[in-house]
Every structure is written in C-alpha cells, then in structure tokens.
Amino acid sequence: MKKSISLLSGTLLIISGALLYSFEKMMAYIMWAAHRIGPSSSEGWPSEPDVPSLLENWFVPIFLVLGIFFILKGFFDKHND
C-alpha cells in the first residue's frame, strides 16, 4: 500500500469517527430539546440531555483505532510514492 493512500485512509477514518460521534451528540441534544418543548414537558423532563459516551457506539472507537493505525503505518512505511 502506498504511503499517501495509507495516510489518506487513516485521515478519512478518523474524520468519519469524529463526525459519527458529533452527529450522535447533536441528535441527543435535538431530541432533548424537542421533548422539553413538546407536550411531554409537563411530565418532568431532565434538565440535562443524556449525551452518549465516546465508546457507546462501537463504530467510533474502531474507526479511531484503524485511523491511527493507518496514519502510523503511512509515516513509518519505508516505501515512497
């Protein structure tokens, strides 16, 4: 595998993991806000949203670990482009 392909795939995997986590976090805030505004707000909705942790969706750590692996492989690969 070429050095540039390894670096590019590692970067894309890390960006994918970060975007996936950001979308999950954004979805939690949107759902929390929608429930607070809606008719169920009189039932005592929590004052803080239930934000997912980094390891809750198992794709996020897999993407991050694979991305770091490919970036390190790209940096330490002896072959040039």
Image (spheres, rainbow, N blue to C red):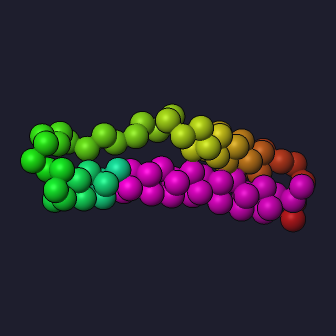
Count the labels in the image: 0
Q: Is residue 25 visible?
A: yes
Quadrant of the rendering where the C terminus is positioned: bottom right
Q: Position of residue 55 (x, y in %)?
A: 51, 34
Q: Please tell me which residue is depicted at 18% across the width and 50% down the height of the picture.
A: 40
Q: At 23% across and 53% down in the image, what residue appears?
A: 35
Up the image or down, 52 lies above or below 18; here it is above
**Is residue 68 at least partly visible in the picture?**
no
Viewer-proximal residue among 27 and 68: 27
Q: Name the outermost residue toward the left.
A: 42
Q: Which residues are magenta?
A: 1-27
User: In the figure, 17 relative to 44: above or below?
Assistant: below
Describe residue 55's horizontal placement relative to residue 68 as left or right.
left
In percent of the image, x 62 and y 43: which residue is there?
59
| Residue depicted at 30% across the width and 40% down the height | 50
Q: Judge whether residue 21 is colored magenta.
A: yes
Indicate yes or no whether the magenta region holds residue 78: no
Say left or right for 53 vs 75.
left
Q: Is residue 2 left or right of residue 22?
A: right
Out of 28 and 39, give the one closest to the viewer. 39
Reply above or below: 67 against 33: above
Quadrant of the rendered image containing residue 60: top right
